Image: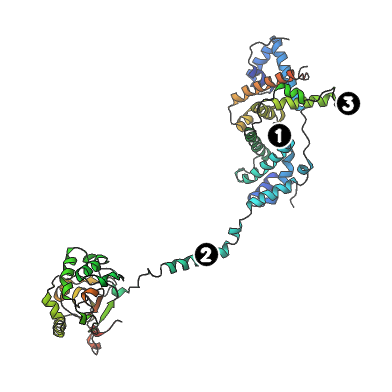
Amino acid sequence: MVMRCDFSIELLNAYLDNELDEKQKLFVEGHLKDCPACRAELEELKGCDRLLKQREIEEPSNKFLLGFENRIIAAVAKKTRTPLIWRISPILVPVASAALITFFVLVNREKTQPIVGLDERVPGIGYVTERKDESIKKAEPVEKMRQVTKGWDLKEVSGKKAEAASEERAPATISKSATTPPAPVGGITTVPGAAAAPRPISTESRDEELLTDDGLARSQAKMAELNIPKNKVVRAIVDSTGRVVRVVTGNTIQPEEDKLLEQQLEGQQLAPRSSTAGQTQNLLYLDLTQQSDTDTSKPDSLKTHQ
Amino acid sequence: MYNTNEGDDALIDQVKKGDAEAFSPLVERYKMALYKIIYRMVGNRDNTEDLVQEVFIKTFNEIGKFKSGMPFYPWLSRIAVNHTINYLKRERQDRFMPIEDLKEILPSHKDDPVQMTRDKMLKEKIAQAMAKLPKDYRVILVLRVEEDLPYDEISRILKIPRGTVMSRLARARQKLKEIFKEIKVNGYAL
């Protein structure tokens, strides 16, 4: 047996596989001429390849030869078939959506806020929303007012001013006889559940005065003295004691505050009391708009919005 | 039914459009080629048939990646080789079989001298020698010697540098030659 020299076996294999460029090929052939061991090695490698190509391959089964394509197609079609859930989705989606909507409507039914009309929007206050709290009826007057004012959506009602006003007003408004308010003077809309806003001036004597018809009559007379332009939308928010807490004007959807008119009317009782202090959860809405001369048969202020 | 003479590209376009039936002629056309290449690496009929099926399903699922206009079979065979290599890794079929065990399972002239011809014996010995090779050597010999693929293509399929292809192929041939000597296969030497 001839011992191989240390010539690169990789080059010899690459030469056998015809993977060398011309320069490398000439180099290997030059070596092979002078090296009988590498020539013998090359022949052995060729013999190995020759044997390898004779390798027997077992015949495939009949199952493979017949019907193999159909099995492949069945397998891939099964994978690509649309799932049942998607096939029935044209029916399922609308039904499921309707069921979901119904569910949420039923669940949130009690939480739904009452619809508030555009006329009930007041700048700086926003929407007046209903607030139910049974515990308020059982609480003491001052505490009741605290509780009432605590949860208001009214931005300007929060703070010491509101608290002070509540504490001030509350004792004076305890009156069982006033729990059933008289009919509104006119243009009064009750916003259910809304709480009264604070007022800057509040004295016990004044509260007592407001309980009388004289006080109400005087305030209404003063209002009549005001020079309110015809056809100008003027709206006032009064608290449960009938006093004005906010005045707005304008015909736009978002009305403007009228500070001048508000100062003139502030603290005036333009409506009768609607409840006692312990039940002051209603905000009264008063329309002071003066109709033009063509429609003087009934002042707008006397119109009822309910 | 599809015309079996229809070109690969036309059939592949149909498959890409969602017509699974158009894949059938492609399976029929290439199943034997895949069977041979996989069998040479696996050396077992049942496993080979299963692997061919898996390769066709995998090919169908990845048909969207095939670039139209390119030859289909090299792409298909690449999937087959990679899938088989992964199978061999999982199955740990690259374990060395002790040479004594190999001699035991080889049929002997004395046992059945009538039915076993010399050629048949030789072919079976070659198959056993290949089975004894480590997986990496077996795969590279199949690709180069039996599939006649160039080094660059082998490099792409196996994701190894061309230089590694050269060295691994050289070592694989040396190892095969040693096994042939051990089991007394003399046909490799002229």
Foreground residue among B34 and A240: A240
- The image quadrant where one finds the C terminus of chain A is bottom left
Q: Position of residue A84 (x, y in %)?
A: 61, 58
The residue under label 1 is: B37
Which chain's residue wears label 2? A
Q: Determine whether label 1 and label 3 are within 8 Å by CB.
A: no
Which amino acid is tagged 2?
Ala
Q: Secondary structure at mark 1?
A: helix
The residue carrying pointer 2 sits among few (fewer than 14), some (14 to 19) or many (20 or more) residues within 10 Å by Cα, namely: few
Q: Earlier in the sequence, mark 1 or mark 3?
A: 1
Which chain's residue wears label 1? B
Foreground residue among A209 and B65: A209
The type of colouring in the image is rainbow
Residue A174, quarter of picture:
bottom left
Q: CA distance from mark 1 to mark 3?
A: 31 Å
Which amino acid is tagged 1?
Ile
For the question of whether residue A83 can be seen, the reply is: yes
The residue under label 2 is: A96
The residue carrying pointer 3 sits among few (fewer than 14), some (14 to 19) or many (20 or more) residues within 10 Å by Cα, namely: few
Respond whether the residues carrying marks 2 and 3 are from the same subunit.
no
Residue sitting at the far bottom: A297
Which chain's residue wears label 3? B
Foreground residue among A77 and B156: A77
Position of A103 relative to B15 (above/below): below
The residue under label 3 is: B114
